[in-house]
Image (cartoon, rainbow, N blue to C red):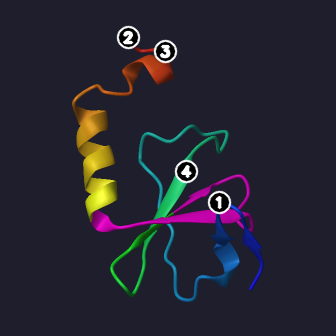
């Protein structure tokens, strides 16, 4: 399996069903997520479907999503 220092090859994740937000950019500038059989969550760049996928626990994803809802990252997106 091909690997990168910060992830594994997204194509090497068997059975992954990738999905992206309904708010995604029509130009494909977004990320996709897939729930893994072990309960983890994989994240990849939608423009590089064979590139690296980062693997997180559900708790890590939940903390990120809550932080996004709370506005913790608004400055990174030029929103605040």
Q: Earlier in the sequence, mark 4 or mark 3?
A: 4
Instruction: Tell me, yes or no, whether the two marked residues, 4 and 3, touch with CB atoms within 8 Å.
Output: no
Instruction: Tell me, yes or no, whether the two marked residues, 3 and 1, touch with CB atoms within 8 Å.
Output: no
Instruction: Tell me, yes or no, whether the two marked residues, 2 and 1, touch with CB atoms within 8 Å.
Output: no
Mark 1 sits on what residue? 6
Mark 3 vs mark 1, CA separation in Å: 26 Å
Quick one: quadrant of the C terminus? Answer: top left
Mark 4 vs mark 2, CA separation in Å: 21 Å
Q: Is residue 16 left or right of residue 52?
A: left
In front here: 69 or 3? 3
Mark 2 sits on what residue? 80
In front here: 72 or 10? 72
Camera-side mark, 4 or 2: 2
Mark 2 vs mark 3, CA separation in Å: 6 Å
Q: Is residue 50 left or right of residue 74?
A: right
The crowding category of the residue bearing disc 2, from other C-alpha atoms within 10 Å (few below 14, some 14 to 19, many at least 20), is: few
Mark 4 vs mark 3, CA separation in Å: 18 Å
Element on which disc 4 rests: strand
Give coordinates of residue 25: x percent, y percent: 56, 37
The crowding category of the residue bearing disc 4, from other C-alpha atoms within 10 Å (few below 14, some 14 to 19, many at least 20), is: some
Mark 3 sits on what residue? 78
Camera-side mark, 2 or 1: 1
Camera-side mark, 1 or 4: 1
Q: Earlier in the sequence, mark 4 or mark 2?
A: 4
Span highlighted in magenta in the image: 43-58
Residue at the image position 31 percent from the left and 27 percent from the top: 72
**For residue 12, which quarter of the picture?**
bottom right
Q: Please say whether residue 59 is one of the residues in the magenta stretch.
A: no
Q: Is residue 79 above or below residue 12?
A: above
Mark 4 sits on what residue? 31
Element on which disc 1 rests: loop
Give coordinates of residue 70: x percent, y percent: 22, 30
């Amino acid at each position: 399996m091909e690997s990168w220092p910060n992830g594994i090859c997204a194509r090497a994740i068997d059975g992954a069903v990738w999905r992206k937000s309904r708010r995604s950019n029509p130009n494909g500038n977004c990320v996709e997520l897939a729930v893994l059989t072990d309960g983890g969550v994989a994240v990849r760049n939608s423009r590089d479907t064979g590139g690296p996928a980062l693997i997180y626990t559900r708790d890590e994803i939940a903390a990120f999503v809550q932080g996004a809802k709370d506005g913790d990252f608004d400055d990174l997106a030029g929103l605040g």
